[in-house]
Image (cartoon, rainbow, N blue to C red):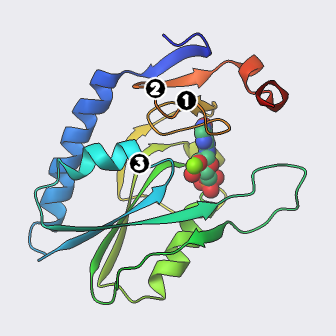
Amino acid sequence: MHPDLQKVLVSPEAIESRIRALGQAITKAYGDCEELTLIAIINGAVPFTADLMRRIQCPLRFDCMRVASYLDSDSPQQEPEIVDMLRLDLKDRHVLIIDDILDTGHTMARVRKEIQRLKPASLRFCVLLEKTGRREVALKPDFVGFSIPDEFVVGYGLDFAERYRELPCIGVLKPECQNPPMWQ
Ligand code: IMP
Ligand code: MG
């Protein structure tokens, strides 16, 4: 286990087998559509999307969106900002958004608003993790990897200050490692 982790919540083996099942569920849900458009919310969804897309047995198109959330409590509460928008045309397309974690729901709500304006044929959400206790926006993902308790987790794409994304498991970060000055 990485020394900065307090505990491992989800092992690499559990991630792999859950992704296989998610791939099957998504394939079943979209089996009849001609082509599915996957949209990954970067950076966090990168490892998850890379593994999941190879478990989906439908023809795919792929694009990314970058969203900046202002989680810093010193700054005023702001709507998350789309800092990098898609290039693909989504009109009348079946769209599946993929993100690492659904927490308050503000990020997904912002993405939903933006994508709905492009008039897709359908719009669904897939998240690797969800923290159900902290939702501030009514939003229910269509596909969920794991529901986790309200603890700060890193690994398999999830970061603290852009660190730990490369860890193969998902684990709870030690409180003493959540202190930004140590990174300066
Ligand atoms: P939201 O609160 O649903 O808008 O989630 C915003 C973003 O917060 C997610 O996309 C993650 O990047 C980040 N986030 C929320 N909880 C965690 C966590 O436990 N670890 C790492 N990032 C998190
Ligand atoms: Mg993120």
Check disc 2 and report its element: helix, strand or loop: loop
Question: Do labels 1 and 3 touch, CB within 8 Å?
Answer: no
Measured in 3D between alpha carbons, the distance from the residue under mark 2 to the one under mark 1, in whole angstroms, is 6 Å
Which is nearer the eye, 132 or 154?
154
Check disc 3 and report its element: helix, strand or loop: helix
Kind of residue at disc 1: Tyr
- Residue occupying image coordinates x 16% and y 54%: 56
Q: In this view, does 184 lie above or below 92?
A: above
- Disc 1 residue lies near ligand 1 with CB under 8 A: no
Q: Which residue in the structure is indicated by mark 1?
A: 164
Measured in 3D between alpha carbons, the distance from the residue under mark 2 to the one under mark 3, in whole angstroms, is 13 Å
Measured in 3D between alpha carbons, the distance from the residue under mark 1 to the one under mark 3, in whole angstroms, is 13 Å
79 vs 4, left or right, is right
Q: Which residue in the structure is indicated by mark 3?
A: 46
86 vs 106, left or right, is left
Check disc 1 and report its element: helix, strand or loop: loop
Kind of residue at disc 3: Val
Please provide percent x and percent y for residue 82: 60, 71
Question: Do labels 2 and 1 touch, CB within 8 Å?
Answer: yes
Query: Which quadrant of the rendered structure holds the C terminus?
Result: top right
Kind of residue at disc 2: Leu
Please provide percent x and percent y for residue 44: 50, 47
Q: Is residue 131 above or below residue 36?
A: above
129 vs 31, left or right, is right
Please provide percent x and percent y for residue 85: 51, 75
- Residue occupying image coordinates x 42% and y 24%: 169
Q: Earlier in the sequence, mark 1 or mark 3?
A: 3
Q: Which residue in the structure is indicated by mark 2?
A: 167
- Residue occupying image coordinates x 48% and y 17%: 8
**Rendered image quadrant of residue 10:** top left
**Rendered image quadrant of residue 98:** bottom left
